Amino acid sequence: MATSVQIPLSEYLSTAYRPDCEYVDGELVERNVGKYEHARLQALLAAWFIQNQKSWRLVALTEQRVQVSPSRVRIPDVCIVPFGPQADVLSQPPLVVIEILSPDDLQVELQRRSRDYIAMGVPNIWVIDPSNRMALWHSAEAWHETTSELRIAGSPVYVDLEALFRDLDESRA
C-alpha cells in the first residue's frame, strides 16, 4: 500500500515544482500537463483574452495557483481575473476558471476540482473538451453543454468555441 508524505501549506507555497503540482489536504497532486491540443487550446484561449483584455478589463492567467480553501490549492489551465493588483497565489475567486481536458484526465478528478471551485465561489467554470469539440459550463447549481460559445451572463465576455476549434484544426493542417 502506497503512503503519501504530508507537507505543510507554507512549504508547498514556497516551493517551485516542475511541472507544478496541486496541493490537496497536505498532499501534492500531480497534474496532467496535456498534449498538443491541450497546450494549443490553452495558448489560443490566453491570446483571445489578451486581445480583449482592455475592453473587457480582464486579465488571463495560465496555470495560476488558486487557493480554493485553507487546505487546497488548485491550478486551472486558464483563469480570468479583473484588472488590478493580484496576489501571487489567488485567494479570491477568479471570474472564470477554465479547465481543458486531456486524454489522461480522470472524470472523478475533474469533479473534485470543480467542486473545489464551486465551494470557493467561482461564478464561471468552463470545461473544454478538445476531443469532442464541445464544452461544459457551470451556472446556478447545474452543468450545461455547448458547442458554439461560452459566455459570462450580463457581460460582453465570451469565447467563440467554433472559431477556437477552427483555429486548432488549422494549426494542425
Image (cartoon, helix red, strand yellow):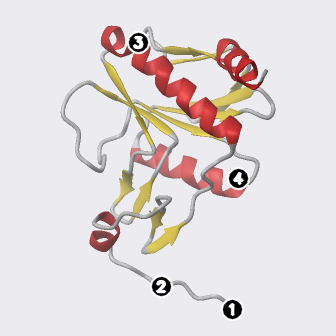
The three-letter amino acid code for the residue at tag 1 is Met
Nearer the observer: mark 1 or 3; the answer is: 3
Where residue 5 is drawn, which disc sits there? 2
Pointer 1 and pointer 2: residues touching (CB < 8 Å)? Answer: no
* Residue type (three-letter) at the residue carrying disc 2: Val
The image shows residue 59 at horizontal and vertical percentages of 34, 26
Q: Nearer the viewer, residue 24 or 45?
A: 45
Mark 4 or mark 3: which comes first in sequence? 3
What secondary structure is marked by label 3?
helix
How far separated are the C-alphas under marks 2 and 3? 43 Å
Label 2 Cα neighbours within 10 Å, binned few <14 / some 14-19 / many ≥20: few
Q: Which residue is mark 3?
A: 52
Give the Cα separation between the discs numbered 2 and 4: 23 Å
- Say how many tags the image has: 4
Looking at the image, residue 66 sits to the left or right of residue 105; the answer is left
Going 76% across and 21% down the picture, which residue do you hit?
Answer: 169
The 10 Å Cα crowd at callout 4, few under 14, some 14 to 19, many 20 or more, is some
Q: Can you identify the residue that label 1 sits on? A: 1
- Rounded to the nearest whole Å, what is the CA distance between mark 1 and mark 2? 13 Å
Does the rendering let one see residue 15? yes
Residue 38 image-quadrant placement: top right
In this picture, is 36 found above or below 12? above
Going by the numbered disc 3, the residue's amino acid type is: Asn
- Residue 108 at x, y percent in the picture: 69, 57
Circle 2/circle 3 CB separation < 8 Å: no
Tell me the SS state at disc 1: loop
Q: Position of residue 164 (x, y in %)?
A: 65, 18
Instruction: Name the disc covering residue 105, or none.
Output: 4
Q: Earlier in the sequence, mark 1 or mark 3?
A: 1
